[in-house]
Image (tube, rainbow, N blue to C red):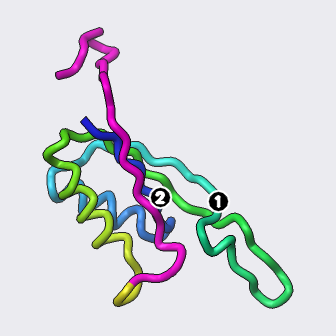
């Protein structure tokens, strides 16, 4: 299994979640985050905004579904024709084990 963390613009999170659900990947966890990427924030006049609001989605999936989920997120979260700085990042981590609390069972 893999855990996918996708950091996306807040205005794109509904669209990303809908695209994932439409493809059969409806399970995710979302939370609001703030931070900065390679661009170190933005400057507007004399004001510097070094932490931008984003949303982070966490999705746990089978190894075989990882690439499709990443493609959906990348295609849906990108802004403009060729993307813009600040569109987000995706991180993929291995998941060693998973358990369901209600049944107190280890997932396969």
Q: Say whether marks 1 and 2 touch (CB < 8 Å).
A: yes
The disc, 1 or 2, on the residue closer to the chain's N-terminal end is 2
**Which image quadrant: the N terminus?**
top left
In the displayed structure, 91 sits above or below 8; it is above
Residue 89's label in the rendered image is: none
Q: Is residue 70 magenta?
A: no
Tell whether 55 sits left or right of 38. Answer: left
Residue at 75%, 73% (x, y): give it.
Answer: 49
Residue at 29%, 40% (x, y): give it.
Answer: 2
Q: Position of residue 27 (x, y in %)?
A: 28, 42
Tell whether 30 sits left or right of 66. Answer: right
Tell whether 7 sits left or right of 33. Answer: left
Q: Nearer the viewer, residue 25 or 37?
A: 37
Say which quarter of the image contains residue 54.
Answer: bottom right
In the displayed structure, 12 sits above or below 67; it is below
User: Which residue is label 2 attached to?
Assistant: 7
Q: Nearer the viewer, residue 10 or 60?
A: 60
Q: Position of residue 37 (x, y in %)?
A: 59, 66
Read off the magenta span: 83-108
Residue at 41%, 52% (x, y): give it.
Answer: 91
Residue 35's label in the rendered image is: 1
What's the CA distance linking mark 1 and mark 2?
Answer: 10 Å
Q: Residues within 10 Å of mark 1 (few under 14, many from 20)?
A: few
In the displayed structure, 61 sits above or below 87; it is above
């Amino acid at each position: 299994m893999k855990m996918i963390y996708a950091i996306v613009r807040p205005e794109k999170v509904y669209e990303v979640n809908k695209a994932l659900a439409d493809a059969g990947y409806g399970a995710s966890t979302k939370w609001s985050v703030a931070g900065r990427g390679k661009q170190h924030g933005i400057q507007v006049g004399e004001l510097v905004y070094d932490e931008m609001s984003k949303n982070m989605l966490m999705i746990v999936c089978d190894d075989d579904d990882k690439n499709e989920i990443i493609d959906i997120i990348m295609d849906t979260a990108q802004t403009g024709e060729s993307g813009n700085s600040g569109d987000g990042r995706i991180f993929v981590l291995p998941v060693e084990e998973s358990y369901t609390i209600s049944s107190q069972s280890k997932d396969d």
